[in-house]
Amino acid sequence: MKILVPVKRVIDYNVKPRVKADGSGVDLANVKMSMNPFDEISVEEAIRLKEAGKADEIVAVSIGPVKATETLRTALAMGADRAILVETDDEIEPLAVAKILKAIVDEEQPGLVILGKQAIDDDSNQTGQMLAALLGWGQGTFANTVEVGDGSVEVKREVDGGLQTVKLSLPAIVTTDLRLNEPRYASLPNIMKAKSKPLDTKTPGDYSVDISPRLTTSNVSEPPKREAGEILPDVDALVAKLKEMGVA
């Protein structure tokens, strides 16, 4: 079975984003970028399935600028077999991403697509669900556990207040949650080997996908600063304060 793993280049999760002075977006100048953490989990899960003999090839895919090649090389160093970069400098919205991925799925014919439940830059949480709808495949979102069987995949999903188990016929879409696994670090020998692994470059035009934006960002701003708390002497004072604030 072939597994397709989409990965996205985003601001590193350790970096505090800065808003541009004109409020038009996030300032990416001289900012450390890395693979979306949820996508790292997806790559790790695909590798574990291959190590367990459930898959024989892992294809990593990224849609973005030339620098996204670095993100794909990271996936290759972790254990992916080959990669595809759909090169574009434009900002791609989730629907366009899903349409490009559908075209790649039609071409590659994977048995399973594993992707992060969301990207930490826009937090849309839409691409996996849109891709499943476009393909007409079953989907197991927010995966906590993934078990591949004979012609099916069983996914434990993280839902409010607990876990839900769904069984999907293959091919299927799985989106990963934080507790699915702990991604491995790429070793130096594997980083060197990744440089020689196949990496194809395409464009959205190669897949006949219109990437024109359908959304307009009106303003981006930082959250308001948290106000200092107030220490009250007793419960009566707390109740009085809450009533004053209109909470109680």
Image (cartoon, helix red, strand yellow):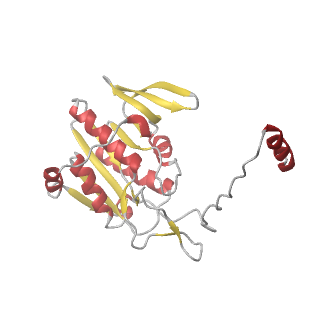
> Can see residue 3?
yes
Which of these two is toward me, 100 or 3? 3
Left or right of 248? Residue 140 is: left
Residue furthest to the bottom in view is 22
Which of these two is toward me, 121 or 235? 235
Left or right of 61? Residue 235 is: right
Looking at the rendered structure, the number of numbered marks drawn on it comes to: 0
x, y percent for residue 126? 52, 48
Q: Residue at x 23, y 35 (%)?
A: 50
Where on the picture, by quarter, is residue 214? bottom right
Quadrant showing the C terminus: top right
Q: Residue at x 85, y 47 (%)?
A: 246
x, y percent for residue 36? 40, 52
> Can see residue 138?
no
Where on the picture, by quarter, is residue 62? bottom left
Which of these two is toward me, 227 or 98? 227
Picture layout, residue 28 above or below residue 232: below
Left or right of 191? Residue 134 is: right
Residue furthest to the front in view is 233
x, y percent for residue 111? 32, 36
Q: Residue at x 51, y 26 (%)?
A: 163
Quadrant showing the N terminus: top left
